[in-house]
Amino acid sequence: MSTLWAPWRSEYITRPKDPSCVFCAAPQNNDPLILKKGTSSFVIMNRFPYATGHCLVAPYRHVRDIAEISEEESRDINSLVQEVVAATRKAMNPDGFNVGMNIGSAAGAGIAEHLHVHIVPRWAGDTNFMPVITDTHIISEHIMETRNKIARMLGEAE
């Protein structure tokens, strides 16, 4: 029998809910999961990823809707998305990506108060019965190891 070890899921479910915005706090606290800071937005690893390498790009400004961001924020967000996709491709060799936003809780946004873009690397055959039957995602690598791989590739791009 194999053992599935995902202690961060328990942490997420049982911890007290912090009323502050994680996307506002991360850059202020120099969160170690931040991959890159842009002029008006930043890239951070998703602490509770759907797949290994799942990153998020968010503006520094606390804004909830894409219709509310400035042209500068839009350019910076899109530029960082492109850079992260390229760096993740070099670091992890995925077969594809899901890139997108969930705007509003009805659309599936877990943190609806602060706009963010999901970048999820995908591999052929990476979906299986685990999420459907057990509501469990299998993450095959420690988040800091993945972060460091992608960060090295981002550094090479600069």
Image (tube, rainbow, N blue to C red):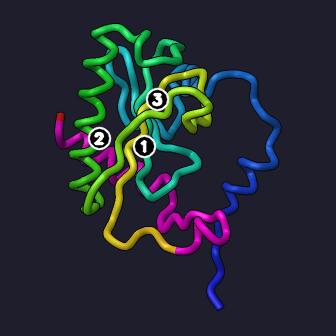
Q: Nearer the viewer, residue 149 or 86?
A: 86
Q: Which structural element holds mark 3?
A: loop
Element assignment for label 2: helix
Q: Is residue 135 highlighted in magenta? A: yes
- The quarter holding residue 10 reads bottom right
The dot on residue 84 is 2
Q: Earlier in the sequence, mark 3 or mark 2?
A: 2
Look at the numbered discs 2 and 1 and tell me whether their residues touch, using CB distance below 8 Å: yes
- Identify residue for label 3: 116
Identify which residue is drawn at 34% across, 14% down: 73
Mark found first going from the N terminus, 3 or 1: 1
Residue 24 position in % (x across, y down) = 56, 20
Q: Is 96 drawn above or below residue 18 in the view shown?
A: below
- Residue at x 48%, y 68% (from the top left corner): 140
The residue identified by callout 1 is 55
* Residue 111 placement, left or right of 94: right
**How many discs appear?**
3
